[in-house]
Amino acid sequence: MTLAWDIRARVQFEGDAHVIEDACGFNGPNAWVIDGATPLLEQLGLPAASDPQWLAQLLSTTLAGPYADPARSGVRARLASALAAVDAAATPLVGAERVRFPSAAISVAQLNRDGVEVASLADCTVVVRADDGVTHVVRAELADARVEAAVARSGESRRPISPQGRLLLLEREREVRNTAGNLWVARREPEAADHAHVVQLGRPALMVMASDGAWRAVDLGLVSGPEEFLERTATTLGALDLMHALRVRQAAIGEVADDATVLALAPRP
């Protein structure tokens, strides 16, 4: 059995507010999508157009490279190895700094003899149509869900949180990431892989990996749900058409567009 991916579509649209901070790719049995988190804290000045761009590109390059660890296997080990490489590259640049270090949502998929195993941190989305026709959706946790829930509760209590208060909550949420009881993301801690949401699915017929900026097509109702998103992004022309329609809708409603990345793959026969 061949354990490698063939590409169906790869489309990236830069957002409105900053340089592109998404990345994606595939090599052998592995595939990944990465969505760098827009900085809220002071940037460190890493050698790229932005700190999140540096992280996303380094993670992508590392995941595309060789991996040989006879003691560990599987998608969680692959993710931990990539994060360890980030930590090693970061140390001579920024020392032990963690709180202001950039973070990212990430999903990594790995073909194996049972099908495909997916590991996710934060809010990239993976949609898999298995050989039996069943569609599966894999996502760990919406990155700012806890802050938005707190804002919603404050409105219900008639003591709404102000926009400045919401920003302070978001900053605090960034400061406590990758600690017990809080959101775990791809940053520089290899142990984050131990907190990833991991699922084993059967043999895929088609898989689409998307950053949350691309998933806005679902949120805004341009497609009816994951199944239609999968269908629309299964080819380059289809993915381009949907992402263009998303940008048109976002411009019409005055929404600042985020980076949007779609990677559609199928197992090599």
Image (tube, rainbow, N blue to C red):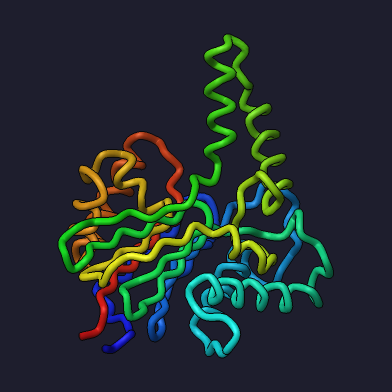
The furthest residue to the left: 133
Image quadrant in which the N terminus is located: bottom left
Residue at x 64%, y 39% (from the top left corner): 170
In the picture as drawn, the residue positioned furthest to the top comes out as 158
Seen at 57% across and 81% down, the residue is 72
**Total marks drawn?**
0
- Residue furthest out toward the right: 95
Measured as percent of width and height from the top left, residue 141 is found at 49, 47
Left or right for 234, reference 160:
left
Q: Is residue 210 left or right of residue 50?
A: left
Q: Is residue 2 visible?
A: yes
User: Relative to residue 36, is residue 11 drawn left or right?
Assistant: left
Front one among 196 and 101: 196
Q: Quadrant of residue 225?
A: top left
As drawn, 18 above or below 208 = above
Rendered position, 215 above or below 234: above
Q: Looking at this view, is 215 or 113 the one in front?
A: 113
Q: Position of residue 202 (x, y in %)?
A: 28, 68
Quarter that holds the C terminus: bottom left
Residue 93 spot, x, y in % from top left: 79, 73
Question: Image point 26% across, 39% down: which residue?
Answer: 221
**Residue 208, percent across and down?**
30, 64
Residue 69 visible in the displayed image: no
Which residue appears at 35% of the width and 42% of the height?
A: 250
* Residue 259 position (above or below residue 235): above
